[in-house]
Amino acid sequence: MRHRTLSLMLPALAAFTALALTGCAGFDAASKTVAPTKASLSGIKGLVHGGQNPISYASLQVYQAGTTGYGTGATPLIPSGSYFAGGASGCVPSQTQTCYSGVVTDGGGNFNITGDYSCTLGKELYITATGGNPGAGTNNASVLMAGIGLCDNLANVQDLLINEVTTVGTVWALAPFMNDSYSASTQTGYVNIGTSSTNTTGLQQAFADINTLVNYVTGSSPGPAPGSQATVPAGTTVPSQEIYALADVLAACVNTTGSGSCTSLFGYTTVNSVAPTDTVGAALNMATNPSASGNATNILQLGAAQAPFATSFTAANDLTLAVTYTGSGINTPSALAVDGSGNIWIANAGGNSVTELAHNGTPVGNSPFTAGSISAPTALAIDTSGDVWIANGNSTLTELSSAGANMNSSPFSGGGLNGPVSIAFDGLGNAWIANYTGNSVSEFSSTGTAISPATTGYTATGLSNPIGVAVNNH
């Protein structure tokens, strides 16, 4: 609250100062414009499905992800209220009528969020559909969701199809930022998504991952094809068959009244003796514990009977979702590292180059890079300045800038380099290299000057064929 008060007071002080300096001519209210900080949720509409069946009278809520900690701080944007089935307000619970909170789907699973609600620009949004009737009767254990993305981009959001596929894609992408506090028995709590104030970029990239895994407009996988607004790069292989298999598992629970398949699913996805009580909770436990205590194949079999989403994925050792990238100069990759922007750098032993990919798998700049006489690279690391250091198979070191340009007239040699296979940096920015062939460790300054002995590097009793190096800065 102190931050908000300060941000409101500072413009007022600035305006007062300008008036004092310029006299009456400085008082020109008509010329002042204030940048908007909110956007309307109007236009967000769509369908909620359990498998291929519409879910009627499910409660919809749009949340704004938090920035005060992981799995916390999310803000519901639609005030709670009581409604009759069909949307009329003023419902009072009784034995003859059922009440629903907030925005609800109609009898055909349709919903429409009006302009009465708004979000804060720069914040990530997600939507949940809780409870409702998929045809068999009301199922309070049914929670489905979809990640929408930045509030700023709502004008580009089309109709949504919220189903088990969008739920799988959203949960697996956002799992590191999620906490499910919803209780099916009391119908309280909600799916809480948040990040630390220093990792908003990480959350944005996780939301972008949703668009790689699934398409929230069609409720299918993979995400939008190349050429559409949210592009899945060419050469990207999304595990769509596994996503559909997991969606079938959730659908087996969603399309019930909360028993039967739900009981089995919650049992198989129990973690630390605590069983989930809703489908998002079960999905989150699978995403964060992919081996599912050895129950992966048993879990997949839960969806075999209904299988509203056709799939050939029927058995697995674990339930990890892995996206595969090819092309972009990737050739016999031998090492990788992630820079401060979330871009991925890959050493190509077979291509005498390094590839830089954006978080979504798109090549960055003129990647792949070959500057600095890169030769059969065996290791790669990024220093605190963002420069990329590559250990070469010919016992030299290459240093590249974050843009892929050669730095400090690399490649560097000497310092006992002999079969380098691993790189780490100390608190002074010096590079330490493990030499597998030389049975030694080399040290170079941040500018590429050899510090360790020229011929032997650093040796020690028992140091033999080292394959890794790490620095304890304490």
Image (cartoon, grey):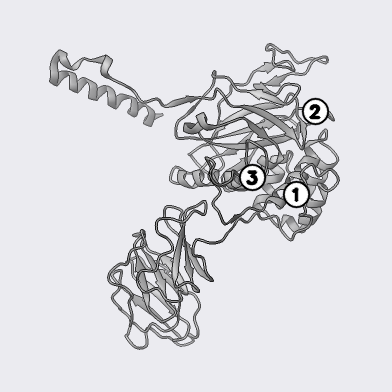
Distance from the alpha carbon under mark 2 to that under mark 1: 24 Å
Mark 2 closeness class: few <14, some 14–19, many ≥20 residues within 10 Å: many
Percent x, y for residue 209?
56, 47
Residue type at tag 3? Gly
Q: Which residue is mark 3?
A: 169
Contact, CB < 8 Å: mark 3 with mark 1?
A: no
Please give left or right for residue 244 compared with residue 147 in the image. right
Element carrying mark 3: helix
Give the mark, 3 or 1, whose residue is nearer the N terminus: 3
Q: Which residue is mark 2?
A: 138
What is the residue that sits farthest to the front in this orientation?
Answer: 227
Query: Image quadrant for the C terminus?
Result: bottom left
Element carrying mark 1: helix
Q: Which residue is mark 1?
A: 245
Q: Nearer the viewer, mark 2 or mark 3?
A: 3
Give the mark, 2 or 1, whose residue is nearer the N terminus: 2
Residue at screen point 34% across, 23% down? 34
Residue at screen point 55% across, 47% down? 226
From the viewer's perspective, is residue 449 above or below residue 459? above
Residue type at tag 2? Thr
Mark 1 closeness class: few <14, some 14–19, many ≥20 residues within 10 Å: many
Q: Nearer the viewer, mark 2 or mark 1?
A: 1
Mark 3 closeness class: few <14, some 14–19, many ≥20 residues within 10 Å: many
From the viewer's perspective, is residue 436 above or below residue 169? below
Distance from the alpha carbon under mark 3 to that under mark 1: 12 Å
